[in-house]
Amino acid sequence: MKLFKFILPLVVAILLAGTVRGADSFVIEDIRVEGLQRISAGTVFNYLPVKVGDIFDRQKSVESIKALFKTGFFKDVRIGQEGDVLVVTVEERPSIASVKIQGNKDISTEDLTKGLKNIGLTEGRVFDRQILDKVEQELRRQYYSRGKYGLKIDSEVQDLSRNRVAVVLKISEGRVAKISQINIVGNNAFADDDLLSVFELSTPNLLSFYTKNDQYSKQKLAADLERLRSYYLDRGYINFDIESTQVSITPNKKEIYITINVKEGDIFAVKEVKLTGKTIVSPDELVPLVKIGPTDTFSRKLATETSKAISDRLGDEGYIFANVNMVPDIDNAAKTVNITFFVDPGKQVYVRRINMSGNTKTRDEVLRREMRQMEAAWASTAKIERSKTRLERLGYFQEVNVETPAVPGTNDQIDVNYTVTEKPSGNLMAGVGYSQLQGIVFNASVTQDNVFGSGKRVSFTFNNSSFNTIYKLGYFNPYTTLDGISSGFDLSYRDTNAFQLNVSSYSSKVFSAGINLGIPLGEFSSLRANLDYENTLIRTNSRTSIQIIDFINRYGDQYNTFAASLGWTHDTLNRAIFPTHGGMERIQAVATVPGSDLTYYKANIRVQHYFPIAKDLTLMLDGEVAYGDGYGSTDELPFYTNYYAGGPQSVRGFMANTLGPRDSNNRAFGGSKKLVGTAEVFFPVPFLEDSKNFRLGAFLDAGNVFVDSYELGDLRYSTGLSAKWLSPFGALVFSVAQPLNSKDPPDQLQRFQFSFGSGF
């Protein structure tokens, strides 16, 4: 067809060349163009390969007609001669006056219009029937990929005045063809259900309206066949083969049947594993990275993981383009396989330059001090990625990307280019929030996490609810020294009505001032020390319990304390908000120093870990143990520093702070010991892909507070669903929980719990 389109203008040109009167050539004295409507004569002159004064002959006639046809502006070109005047007669192709699309639902009109414009089918362009045919073919491909095989497309070209046309595309999408059956033939080792469980495609089920997994796609089927192949290869079937695949559709184009014919073969065991090539590092370091060994059932997955682990190890030595190939030697008779990992390290590469872009406000030094990869040093894959993670954890950027292009003209140098997208780090808020515990909360705050792009944080906060009034001023410098030592201070005033917190009835006014110091102990660990002064005033009322009255009678109602605290943190979370892997361990102890009006100490250990257990599924395990007591002249932990449990932050399904011991008025009194834990599986929000602002979860909570000793038999349990959304108006937290072993009385239940707040 393409050859025909090329030859046709040439044949026409040769035939029409005979219309030039006279067999002899002539000198062109003038050129006249006839038949033009929209296109200017100058455009024709630009494309003509001849001009006034040239000698015109049959060869020039052929070349001229070909040149004008090639422009695509004309559907007919004729060349004639009147004396020594060259006459060019053309018939223009019509222009497109309008393009209308009707009946489309799956693909928006805006997207279709944009696509048509990109290929030249748009208002004002020259109409070409071939382009319209291509459009119809592409539309069919798009709709077929969505499972709509009953598609009908009617295109109309309406002639208008002034050599214009109107193009109308009428689309009848039809219904989506559903997969009625997927058959696997030839499988003996595994049941159909086991094999189909790894497929993305499926017959209709309850979630198909969201996942669209019952809609056939050639690309999805190809991916599923590769998953099927991997399933067998990871279980020793090294000769597994997919012999054929048939996809059939019913005459009404509403149902699809898929048949896959497989040949399983036999299970092969690993006989020998070798490392060869230029290993660079000591083999003793690489051997622990080999995840498959003799007598193991062959697994392509473990072999691939071994290759990647060795490549990553070589990448830490500067060989970031290392190639580790797994070469199997199959013995079909013995049903064994020898595996050789051939190591090709390539050229050792070092970093010429680290470039930062996109940080329009944040100073370059703020980014560079997070770098673990240095310039002029050997490139390290791990250090480059760790530097990216540290930039993401700053909280100043919406997105961080890294590229490692080779330096032109060299084979042993790369540049490392970090590109960041800044987000507003300042926050000026005034708003209203609400929670079931606090009621209506009025708040105002001025926070700048990145003052003048320096990475320092300054904040002032005002919070007013039915039980709490807080004023707080804070300053924090994460890099007081170049070594990463941080420091800061806080000043605050808090007026609290504890009765509104579901606990014993009293009120307190607390003024505090403190300084803090942070010392990095390594890439993931840090030590933090605080020194705080606190002035506390306690007020009682007619509903105050006997326990609080007795405490005040012994120690008074106003206390000045100086507290020193020390904490150790090991943090490997991949991001600060909604992490998906990594963990955090924290040990913290605080004690008031001798000479304070009250002498006591508190200590707690918290461990939190995230495990990616499947695609889009993350398991979170979180546990905390806390203990406190008085010492010296203070016989007990002061009641206003007790631990509490229950509510959205600990054991959901129970009213906030209500678990544990109770006072003489049957109000929650808290305890000096605390034990809580959570297991939660997070999964995607339906209709939203890869959202970092939404999170759903299914959880199991356990916990309580105690006075004398930890009593595991007194733990309370609950299970349910949770949802968290970091909305533009603040954080929204919801949970629906069912307590599993509540005791009534005294337990107070609250199955649905929520809060939202911050400003707008």
Image (cartoon, rainbow, N blue to C red):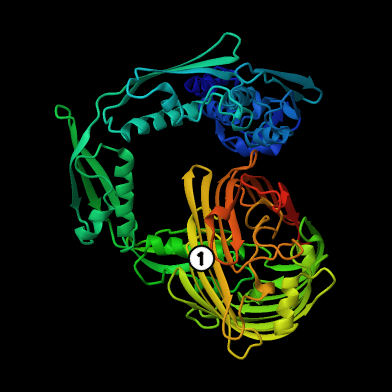
> Farthest residue toward the top?
251
**From the viewer's perspective, is 587 left or right of 260?**
right
Image quadrant occupied by the C terminus:
bottom right
Q: Amino acid at mark 1?
A: Arg
Q: Which residue is mark 1?
A: 390
Q: Position of residue 213 (x, y in %)?
A: 56, 28
Of residues 675 and 669, the one drawn nearer to the viewer in this rendering: 669
Q: Quadrant of residue 384?
A: bottom left
Residue at position x 58%, y 35% in the image: 50
Q: Position of residue 247 (x, y in %)?
A: 47, 17
Question: Residue, x 69% and y 60% (percent of image)?
Answer: 657
Please name whichever residue, 556 or 69, is drawn nearer the observer in this view of the structure.
556
Q: Secondary structure at mark 1?
A: helix
Tell me, yes or no, if residue 429 can be seen here: no
Using the image, determine if residue 737 lies above or below residue 431.
above
* Badge 1: residue crowd in 10 Å (few <14, some 14–19, many ≥20): some
Is 474 in front, or is 53?
Answer: 474
